[in-house]
Image (spheres, rainbow, N blue to C red):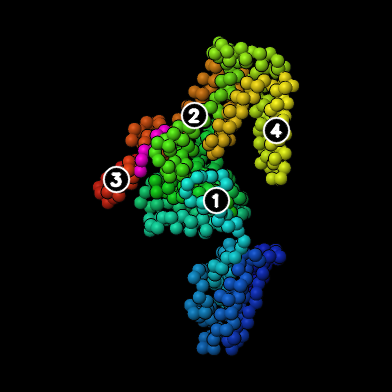
Amino acid sequence: MYKSLSKNISELKSITYNSADFTVRNIELTDKEKTKAAVITIEGMCDKEGIAIAIINPLINADYEKHKKENLYEYIKSSVLSASELVEIDTFNQVMTFSMSGFAVVAVDGSSKMLAIGIQGFSFRSVSSPETEVIQRGPREGFVEPLRINMTMIRRRIKNPDLVFETLEAGDVSKTQMCICYLKSAVSDDILNELRKRLKQTSLSTVMGAGYLVPFLEENNRRSLFSAIGVTERPDTVCGKITEGRIAIIIDGTPSVLTVPHLFVEKFQSVDDYSNRPFYASFTRILKYISFLVAVYLPGLYTAFAAFHPDYFPAMLLQNIITSVSKTPLPVGLEVFLILFIYEVMREAGLRIPRPLGHAVSIVGALVIGEAAVSAGIIGSPTLMVVAIAAICSYVIPELYPAITVARLLLIVVGAIFGLWGIVLLSCVYLVIMCSKTSFGVPYMTPITPFSKKNMRDVFIRSDWKNLSKFTQKVQNLKGTKGAEDEIQE
């Protein structure tokens, strides 16, 4: 930057193309030479009252008589401004980055450096309960959009100097700030270095959400329906994963936080599992696995059995299915596919339309897909019941809903064309892809495969906290001992 204040301001206005929200508050200092100064802000990003009290008033009322013009900048930096967050900057790019992040930049004529003062005051959504991860027992706090507030919510729960935050920047155009968070005593250095490498290699012009980064962080992402990157809106969930050695990626502007490495079994775990007693938590955990299998396989198996293997149905049930199918004009496979298609259309409509119209969609759906369609003989009642059960089961694990939807449709297609053997073959393909998948070098299906007996205590059956806490205690005892690092990481 130049030593001339007027040149610096002109250059900044040129960089921003005289944008309407780029504001400059000119100030005349009370020294003998009436030195010029300026406070540079982006309108709407700073607290106006805070700027007046913490910056403009001290600059105007300070005594500069005993200081020469060449020393005014140092005097202002050390004795006039008393802000808790004060950063010295010396490039135009830094000025734009800090000002667009809610900092007020103070420039003094005669100095090629400026001072960025943290006085953010932009509007944001208050901390509230996350809508996508509802629990019965536990904290009601969810992440919000500002990065610093999300960092604070994690720090408030883990008061440990080993908790480290590293800030990075993503997006050549958006310049989005993000932060990786980890526990130094628990994280794997290899995974941490690999994450830094992948984030630096991200070739994106804009990053507006967590989903933008997932394809760059995930391995073999095009061959698998299931994501190996965890996504959550709950600070307590993130803190639990951090203490287990995982790394959280917080992105400014989105309430969703990414966690790596992420395993398949984690999609069936929730905060409620660890708040309830083990026997009930184990029951709900098993219920989730059963619901997942029902949601994925039930429509496909029904299609395959009805089309190719009717002898697999019990006699009484077979008679009802034959009667129902004979009255409908469509083949079973097309019938199931049609109902699922209409269901997905109505689900998307329910998500996108204004809330006052949501009840209307529910009523129309119940009339059209329910009673009217069955009475008109367009679809059979057994088919409708199968699809309804699968749809309800798919909502038991919301995080897996996209993968369940695609996997279910593929199984219906192969079931209608090849029967049961097509479903078996496609299931083998799913298993091979999932078992070969890794998340930052960690097998995605751990601890099921490769099998680990001691780590199965929190997969299908949730052990009590006495057994779960033994691992943490063991790590604490191993710290500082010879050869402990490899055992802790394992």
Give 314 or 172, whichever is nearer the viewer: 314
Label 1 or label 3, whichever lies nearer to me, is 1
Most common secondary structure along the magenta stretch: loop
| Side (left or right) of 20 relative to 316 | right
Tell me the residue that label 3 is attached to: 474
Q: Name the residue under label 4.
A: 365
Name which residue lies at 49% across and 38% down.
267
Tag 4, which secondary structure? helix
361 relative position to 186: left or right: right
Query: What is the CA distance from the residue labelled 4 to the residue labelled 1?
Result: 30 Å
Q: Give the range drawn in magenta.
A: 459-465
Residue with the most extreme left position: 482
Residue 282 in magenta?
A: no
- Above or below for 432 versus 444: above
Q: Position of residue 274 (x, y in %)?
A: 42, 43
Circle 1: residue type:
Ser
Residue 488 in view in this figure: no
Q: Quadrant of the N terminus?
A: bottom right
The image's mark for residue 129 is 1
Q: What residue type is labelled 4?
A: Gly
First reached walking from the N terminus: tag 2 or tag 4: 2
Tell me the crowding category of disc 1: few under 14, some 14 to 19, or many 20 or more residues within 10 angstroms, Cα based: some
* Residue receiving disc 2: 290
Specify few, some or many for label 2: CA neighbours under 10 Å numbering under 14, 14-19, or 20 or more: few
Measured Cα–Cα span from mark 4 to mark 3 = 55 Å
Q: In which quarter of the image is residue 40?
A: bottom right
Residue 118 percent location from the top left of the image: 54, 67
Q: Which amino acid does label 2 sit on?
A: Ile
Q: Name the residue rendered at 71%, 37% in the picture.
A: 361
Q: Residue 17 falls in which quadrant of the image? A: bottom right
| 89, 44: nearer the viewer | 44
